Amino acid sequence: MQLISVDIGSTYTKGALLVLRDGQLHVQARASVPTTQDDLTTGFVQVLLALGVLEEKTQLETLAPTIPVYVSSSAKGGLSVAAVGLVPNVTMEAARLTALSAGGRVSRVFSYLLTAADIELLEQNPPDIILLSGGTDGGNERYVRQNARRLAASTVPSCIVYAGNRQAAEDVERCLRGKPFTVTENILPALDCLNPEPARQVIRELFLQRIVQGKGLERLIRVLRHDPLPTPLAILEFVKILHKHGTDLEDFCLVDVGGATTDYYSALCHPLPGPETVYRGIPEPRIKRTVEGDLGLRVSACSVLDAAGPSLEADVAHAGHRMESLQAYARHVEAAPGHLAACADEACYDRLLFSTCVSIATQRHAGRLRSVYTADGERHVQTGRDLRHVRRIVLTGGYAAHMNLDHCIPAMATVPVDDTGSSILAPRSPVCWIDRDHLVPLAANVAAAHPEAATRLVHDNLVRTRAATVHPHEHPRTSP
Amino acid sequence: MNHPVIVLGVIGADCHAVGNRILDMYFSSRSYHVVNLGVMVSQDEFIDAAIETGAQAILVSSLYGHGEIDCAGLRDRCIERGLDDIILYVGGNLVIGKQRFEEVAAKFRTMGFDRVFGPDADLAVVDRLLRQDIKRRQPCS
Ligand code: B12
């Protein structure tokens, strides 16, 4: 049985013709063309032509109905979401996590009451969605009501998703009548219970409506027998599947370093610590996604260098280069995001930027552990997730696939403590594996239908790198 | 009136867990909606929880002898963060050495606690007082 999987990215539209035989997926053909921004179907058709499943000039509509087509799209870099919560550490954080787990790009976060200035920001730069939350069920109603009233009185055109205190839902709905609006279940019905799924579903549907609008995708949908998926959501769902079906992938991280952002996913069997450690904050989900908007290899290359710690200078020197040359390269590629490394030096700069993105994103994704000295001795307080035992980091993305593996990727050092003195719960001695043929997004598309085969496909394509992230205090650096 | 919402927790670096469990079980059985934060709870965590859950009262426990330091400023912080009229109770081992309970209780009341209890507090009495206090603070609408 043949299947087609296509991922319409912001720069490239990539596709594969897959064959499912004896429960295994094989890649029969691959194709990649620049994404055609004004009409996405043009690039899509080009990919199908290159895959040999469409004959020249024939219409999309004549595509053999026997071949299922799975499509994902990260149109416009994903859906922008403004997350509104009540207390910063509680519902605001829950709203942020929910938006990210739905594949959204969090453009802004707000807590307590929306001020006139906040509303003005939203009016001038409206996100696609405003996720309005606040209050556990039966809890605080005052803030969400007020915020709903302020949004109602504004000219903000964004679609508002209400996922706050259930008791206030009807009032909020009445108040926002006339605006694009959806009510769903509370993302935090009780303090110790995170419930992102219903809001995630709503955001996903809105995303679909939105990527379908214009750009020719309506036509595509008529031909497809499956709804297109937002790429980050497809990958998040795939991480869940890898977690369930993959060998050695019970607890792992998956990092997608792109031109503009670094998307970080992790799957953990037991995200909460045992009784010996006190846990603080809203409960960690098993599967988590975070997005670093300032870490990327092209559009965000300069901000990567701003965020880098002092260890980068040592890596640069070790690679036989000067910091100034790397900075000049970053400025160059930021201005010319289509640039591909043209010589060995540039390839090395890309590797340095890449490893910096991975190490910083790892540190930000990981939780923190701090010691509290009590009369009874030392106690540990944890916030966020503990990745220390994680052995595998999967690196995916077009850039990762093109990294020359004959050269060592600079060590991805993570620092052991942050500025506040808390330990960073990053993987202690992981091994990085590269998704060599960049199959993750394509396999993700078919994973819901063929979970085990998609897992195998990606698994067999992972190549172990010589680079290991190291915790300098635990593993002294050795030269490559 | 709906079930009153109360926030429980043991403040500071205190990890005496048993009394906290008992308070949780007792007040839950008396049809309060109990939001229990467990041990080693900071002032802000009490306040965060009270804001989000719309709690009427915070019941702070301190067992290990540092209650006075840990509780100082809690009332001010509540007011600062918008909990103008939340009820604050404190209880546990607040008396150290040869102090008299009445002196200690007066000190905690000056710090802004509405009521102060010792380790031998009768929880049925606490329940009765708490209901009275909550009723008194209900806005007359
Ligand atoms: C068990 C215990 C421990 C265990 C705790 C295990 C655990 N995780 O729970 C361990 C060994 C870890 C421990 C450690 C310490 N402990 Co200790 N511990 C005790 C002990 C023996 C029993 C506590 C208990 O569980 N009581 C049973 C429960 C049901 O009672 P309760 O906690 O008092 O709670 C009730 C009331 O106080 C009241 N109440 C409590 N909070 C509130 C709040 C409100 C609003 C109201 C209305 C009522 C209320 O209602 C509760 C339910 O009935 C007591 C002595 C004692 N007999 O009380 C010492 C005691 C509490 N510990 C004490 C001390 C000093 C310590 C340590 C500092 C060091 C040490 N010397 O051992 C450390 C501190 C650790 C820390 N960071 O918190 C002292 C405290 C002295 C003081 N406050 O002046 C005590 C009193 C012993 C003593 N006489 O010296 N301890």
Image: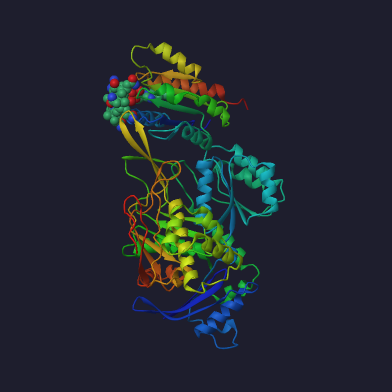
Residue at 37% over, 58% down: A469
Residue at 37% over, 31% down: B25
Residue at 35% over, 32% down: A373
Is residue A243 placed above or below B64 in the rendered structure? Answer: below
Colour scheme of this structure image? rainbow
Left or right of A340: which side holds A315?
left
Ligand 1's image quarter is top left
Which image quadrant: the C terminus of chain B?
Answer: top right
Count of numbered tags = 0
Specify whether residue A288 is in view: no
Is residue A200 placed above or below B101 in the rendered structure? Answer: below
Q: Judge by depth and name the residue closer to the eye, A417 or A314.
A: A314
Residue A445 point in image, percent of width and height: 47, 70
Left or right of A456: which side holds A106?
right
Residue A479 point in image, percent of width and height: 34, 62
Residue B27 point in image, percent of width and height: 41, 29
